[in-house]
Image (tube, rainbow, N blue to C red):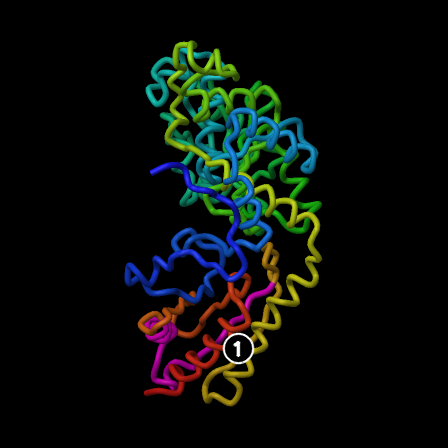
């Protein structure tokens, strides 16, 4: 079969519904932009950008360079590179710090014997995703203890095998944990770069830019601004971004661009081959990035509140149940908390969540302890909110 015309859909035309074809139940997502639920819902602008990118081929290295320049200009940094998610950004960033643009070292990843292959991290900052720093063959070295870390303790942990210092940006960082500014100051005194994981820290917009500029390499997940969840961003120092590119998937074939080099140069064999980014998703990521910097965010958050209000209306008058909208520092800004008097209700928050999940469509809500259900509406439509409210009321009034 020949190459089919990839032009955008005509009005009213829809693709095949593989959820139904495969018997996969749809989920109303009140968890937020979660990997296990497929990330975020892309806007029509994002889908159209992906469709447009599908109409022709490009040299991927050129697309990666130009898109990186575009993102870097908006964020106010030297350079940037689009990656396979934030995990891919972290892993490539670590590889870059270990190998630079040395082709012999690049070919050896993840065998890092003899290289600088230690990543220092404050012990109090150990977290679920710090394993991403070890994927290219690095090992984590802890600084300080579980209660915190001083500048002196961080400095003592940096040694001759240190390739970088890892940092996790946190909304609620304890005073006992060094700030990214103090971390960078200590690391730079030892000639060591800092790799910052700022995956969801994208709002307010000036906060997004400050995070992007705060370390030598900074990693973001584009799913949080409604890009395909396969897209991430790493940005920072130009020399380190050049090393990221040298470890990236296009460098498996050749570090240089152009048809002659791509066909004749001995393959670099870059480990980043495992983390391809397709042109369609990259275009969608840029469309989402543009939208994030141009949308009315007050209107965005009001939309979240409107869905919450509909859920609250549905729960009004349910005995032993109360709800409250709380402001939070995250990019979604507001959350709906539903509090249960579990003994009087005869049902826990976990039991209610399980009943919601058992229905069709499935509904996923977060729960904490016996008495609190947490609902995020940044991944919900108004119709989702109506269905969730009705279903939750039925669950909480059924013995």
Which residue is drawn at the image coordinates 38% and 31% (left, top)? Answer: 134
Image quadrant containing the C terminus: bottom left
Residue 88 can be seen in this image? yes
Residue 115, compared with residue 26, is above or below; it is above
Which residue is drawn at the image coordinates 59% and 58% (left, top)? Answer: 332
Rendered location of residue 348, percent (x, y): 36, 76
Label 1 sits on a secondary structure element that is helix
Location of residue 65 by image quarter = top right
Q: What residue does disc 1 label?
A: 311
Residue closer to the observer: 194 or 120: 194
Q: Is residue 293 magenta?
A: no
Rendered location of residue 262, percent (x, y): 45, 15
Image quadrant containing the N terminus: top left
Residue closer to the observer: 326 or 78: 78
Which residue is drawn at the image coordinates 51% and 65% (left, top)? Answer: 380
Rendered location of residue 61, percent (x, y): 52, 24
* Number of disc labels: 1
Q: Which residues are magenta?
A: 334-356
Rendered location of residue 84, percent (x, y): 46, 37
Residue 174 can be seen in this image? no
Residue 338, compared with residue 169, is above or below; it is below
Q: Is residue 350 magenta?
A: yes
36 sits left or right of 74 in the view: left
178 sits left or right of 119 in the view: right
Residue closer to the observer: 13 or 317: 13
Location of residue 365 by image quarter = bottom left
- For label 1, count other residues whose C-alpha is less than 10 Å away and answer few (under 14), some (14-19) or many (20+): many
Name of the residue lying farthest toward the front = 2
């Amino acid at each position: 079969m020949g190459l089919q015309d990839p032009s955008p859909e005509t009005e009213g035309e829809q693709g095949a519904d593989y959820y139904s074809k495969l018997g996969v139940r749809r989920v109303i997502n009140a968890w937020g932009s979660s990997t296990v639920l497929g990330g975020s819902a892309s806007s029509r602008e994002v889908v159209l950008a992906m469709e447009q990118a599908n109409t022709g081929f490009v040299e991927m290295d050129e697309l990666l360079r130009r898109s990186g320049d575009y993102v870097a200009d908006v964020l106010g940094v030297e350079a940037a590179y689009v990656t396979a998610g934030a995990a891919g950004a972290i892993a490539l960033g670590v590889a870059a710090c270990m190998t630079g643009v040395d082709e012999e070292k690049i070919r050896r990843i993840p065998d890092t014997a003899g290289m600088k292959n230690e990543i220092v991290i404050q012990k109090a900052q150990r977290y679920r995703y710090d394993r991403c720093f070890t994927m290219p063959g690095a090992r984590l070295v802890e600084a300080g203890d579980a209660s915190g870390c001083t500048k002196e303790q961080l400095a003592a942990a940096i040694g001759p095998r240190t390739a970088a210092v890892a940092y996790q940006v946190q909304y609620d960082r304890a005073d006992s944990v060094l700030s990214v500014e103090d971390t960078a100051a200590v690391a730079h005194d030892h000639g060591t770069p800092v790799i910052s994981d700022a995956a969801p820290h994208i709002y307010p917009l000036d906060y997004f830019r400050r995070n992007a500029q705060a370390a030598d390499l900074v990693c973001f997940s584009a799913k949080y601004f409604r890009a395909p969840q396969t897209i991430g961003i790493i940005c920072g120092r130009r020399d380190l971004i050049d090393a990221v590119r040298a470890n990236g998937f296009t460098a498996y074939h050749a570090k240089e661009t152009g048809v002659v080099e791509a066909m004749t140069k001995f393959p670099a064999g870059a480990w980043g081959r495992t983390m391809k980014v397709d042109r369609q998703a990259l275009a969608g990521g840029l469309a989402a990035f543009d939208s994030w910097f141009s949308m009315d965010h007050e209107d965005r958050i009001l939309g979240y509140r409107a869905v919450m209000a509909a859920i609250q209306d549905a729960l009004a008058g349910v005995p032993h149940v109360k709800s409250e909208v709380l402001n939070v520092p995250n990019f979604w800004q507001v959350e709906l908390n539903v509090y249960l008097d579990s003994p009087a209700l005869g049902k826990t928050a976990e039991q209610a969540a399980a009943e919601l999940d058992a229905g069709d469509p499935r509904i996923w809500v977060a729960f904490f302890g016996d008495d609190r259900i947490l609902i995020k509406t940044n991944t919900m439509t108004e119709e989702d909110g109506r269905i969730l409210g009705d279903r939750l009321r039925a669950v909480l009034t059924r013995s």
